[in-house]
Amino acid sequence: MSVAVLNVLCEGQTEERFAKSVLKTYLKDFGIVVKTTILTTSRKKNVRGGMISYRQAKTDLELLIKQYFKKGYEEYFYTTMFDLYALPGDFPGYVDAHRMTDCYDTVSILEDEFGKEINHRLFIPYIQLHEFEALVFCGLEYLLKEYPDMEQEIRKLGKVIEENEYNPERINNSPSTAPSKRIIKAFEGKHNYDKPKLGTFVTERIGIPTLKERCRHFREWIERLEKIGARISSPDKLN
């Protein structure tokens, strides 16, 4: 019997910790093994984390695909966890995507063009709206339990959700109002916001089923991943 192995190329440590802990545990029940890699920033300096150009992503994905391919009883799949926020301008479809007024149209174009560029039937592109911390906004109550002295600040973060029709994926991506920027600002003067640690802490407690309910684009990605364990014999039917 074949085993589905999902290679997740992560933009940084926050995404990697989520994939290694929350995503890995969830997909295990679907017969899927999760492996993670952090995006290479500088090969000469052996630095990982952060996307400066699209070439980084393409190079790393191509290396993953060459390194991991169908071998024996293992069938390899590939996906990404990149943020829409600060996505480099050379990303496939960037210009056309940013002409769109709705963020769901924007990310759809980017993922479609990304998929065409990589051109591999077992690749499932994913770009987070607008960045990973949108998922943290789904569980502000867990931040409050961890930091009870921040009731006022977390209440203000809750109003951000209200302003965005209770949809954290719509929290915009300017340098001052992106999800992570809002959370970091709320923590200033009281606590240090450790993005990888607290991102995993909150999303573990929320759970992927709830994240799927609250984040449409995230749900669509997870549902595609769920299918690969049962369809390794016909990966062309992943959509």
Image (cartoon, rainbow, N blue to C red):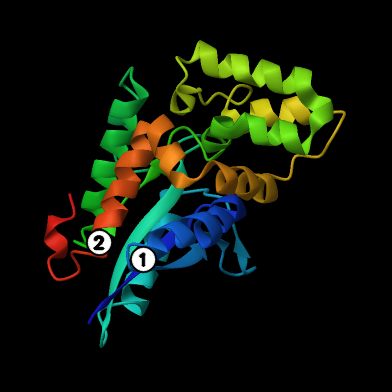
Number of numbered labels in the structure image? 2
| Residue at the extreme top | 163
Residue 129 place in picture, x, y as percent: 44, 34
Residue 11 place in picture, x, y as percent: 51, 52
Residue 71, by quadrant, is bottom left
* Residue that mark 2 sits on: 228
Identify which residue is drawn at 21% across, 50% down.
116
Q: Are marks 2 and 1 in contact (CB under 8 Å)?
A: yes
State whether residue 211 appears in this view. Answer: yes
Q: SS of the residue at dot 1?
A: strand
Identify which residue is drawn at 86% across, 31% down.
190
Q: CA distance from mark 2 to mark 1?
A: 9 Å
Q: On the picture, is 59 further left or further right than 76?
A: right
Task: Give the camera-side residue of 205 and 111.
Answer: 205
**Circle nearer the N terminus (2, 1):** 1
Label 1 amino acid?
A: Leu
* Residue that mark 1 sits on: 6
**Crowding near the residue tagged with mark 1, few <14, some 14–19, many ≥20 C-alpha atoms within 10 Å:** many
Identify which residue is drawn at 46% across, 62% down.
24
Label 2 amino acid?
A: Ile
